[in-house]
Amino acid sequence: TLQTVTVPATPEAFVFDPARTALMLIDMQRDFIEEGGFGQSLGNDVRLLKVAIAPCQAVLAAARAQGMLVIHTREGHRPDMSDAFPAKVDRGAPKLRIGDQGPMGRILIRGEPGHEIIPALSPIAGEPIIDKPGKGAFYATDLELLLRKRNIEALIVCGVTTEVCVHTTVREANDRGFRCLIPGDCCASYHPEFHAVSLRMFAAQGAIFGWVTDSQPLVNALQ
Ligand code: C5J
């Protein structure tokens, strides 16, 4: 096990202790990444998100090999939707709304096939799964409790989509005192332009929200 890891990053190298760092995989769910889910129901091209799968797999394998804490999140709601505000459910004009029956079950509902994490990144025993009703992983979940209990001080944040759930989670984490490293190619968006600008926003102003790298330098550093 490595004591200290140094990863080339923007705006400067990111140094972390794997024992005090968690890998977070945000919402790598069938509903966002596969055909027939929530993302596609909103009119998006889900192929744009699939590019993040292989880089996430590489980082996940390296983190597991170091014995790092790995946390998976899923966005979704209770079957009775008692945790879904009308302000979220009624928004926009999707083909299928949250709770509607789609090809992968009810859209964004816990327990449905579309809510599951994609098989390529399936959680293994001991890896917590955070089910969250919002975009940020800290809102209305016990994520912060799990991290504090493990004395975690830094997060490596991967997942989809860059400007929505990844950005919201990184901002929440930053305000709570966690340093965040974002491997850019482990994140993706339905809007490539938003993805690119999101990465710049993390690292601007001296890493105002976090540090940005890519999967390969991170995996190399974890060897
Ligand atoms: C979205 C997410 N984009 N996981 N959710 O609605 O980013």
Image: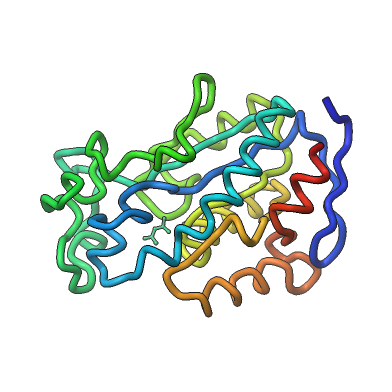
Above or below — where is 100 with respect to 12?
Answer: above
Q: Residue at x 60, y 77 (%)?
A: 197
Question: Image check: 96 left or right of 65?
Answer: left
Which quadrant is home to the C terminus? top right
Judging depth in this view, the residue of 159 and 22 nearest the camera is: 159
* Image coordinates for residue 68, horizontal then vertical, percent: 69, 30
Above or below — where is 91 with respect to 67?
Answer: below
Question: Image check: 131 left or right of 194?
Answer: left
Q: Residue at x 15, y 61 (%)?
A: 96
* Image coordinates for residue 12, horizontal then vertical, percent: 86, 62
Question: Image check: 142 left or right of 2?
Answer: left
Above or below — where is 167 with respect to 178?
Answer: below
Which residue extends farthest top?
A: 125
Above or below — where is 88 with respect to 77?
Answer: below
Judging depth in this view, the residue of 107 and 202 nearest the camera is: 107
Query: Which of the 4 image quarters holds residue 42?
Result: bottom left
* Image coordinates for residue 128, horizontal then vertical, percent: 50, 28
**Colouring:** rainbow
Judging depth in this view, the residue of 77 and 14 nearest the camera is: 14
Q: Residue at x 58, y 43 (%)?
A: 57
